[in-house]
Amino acid sequence: MSLTRRLTELEAEHAELDLLARKTLAKLRGVEAEMEAIRAGVNAPVRFDAIATRTEAILAVLRSADRSLTPSEVTSRLAASGRATDDLKAVTTTMSYLNQRGRIQKVDGSHYFAL
């Protein structure tokens, strides 16, 4: 096997493992946030309406999720929490911005998770 081919294989494996690690870390952050809330005696659902910016609210939604989410799912969770002014177009645009800035990552087509 040539060194070039082996390097290509290792780079592909690295990318796959990196994505898995990022997904696992995102899930870990969500579990930690839930544990912290329970320890603090908070049993109410997570509220995103008190977060000032759409960007931070979207990050909070993704961090609190136990899986990657689509922009529609993020929009629904924001609306359910009282942020009805964040429509799908605005959320999609903001998520695209966050992805370009490396704060979230796109996986499985249109699903995203927080980094």
Image (cartoon, grey):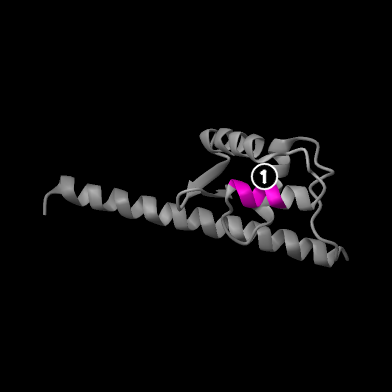
* 78 lies above or below 89: below
Amino acid type indicated by mark 1: Leu
Residue at x 80% of width, y 51% of height: 81
The magenta segment is: 71-76
Query: In this image, 57 relative to 49: left or right?
Result: left
Query: In this image, 46 relative to 58: left or right?
Result: right
Q: Secondary structure at mark 1?
A: helix
- Asked if the magenta segment contains residue 74, the reply would be yes
Towards the viewer: 29 or 75:
75
Query: In this image, 82 relative to 109: left or right?
Result: right
Q: Residue furthest left?
A: 1
Residue at x 85% of width, y 62% of height: 44
Residue at x 59% of width, y 55% of height: 26
For label 1, the crowd category at 10 Å Cα-Cα, with few meaning under 14, some 14 to 19 and many 20 or more, is some
Which percent across, then down, holds residue 35? Answer: 75, 65
Which percent across, then down, holds residue 103? Answer: 58, 40
Q: Residue furthest right?
A: 41
Which percent across, then down, holds residue 63? Answer: 66, 52
Q: Main secondary structure of the magenta part?
A: helix
- Asked if the magenta segment contains residue 85, the reply would be no
* 28 lies above or below 4: below
Q: Quadrant of the N terminus?
A: bottom left
Towards the viewer: 25 or 101:
101
Residue 96 image-quadrant placement: top right
Query: In this image, 74 relative to 100: left or right?
Result: right
Label 1 sits on residue:
59
Residue at x 65% of width, y 41% of height: 88
Which percent across, then down, holds residue 112? Answer: 55, 49
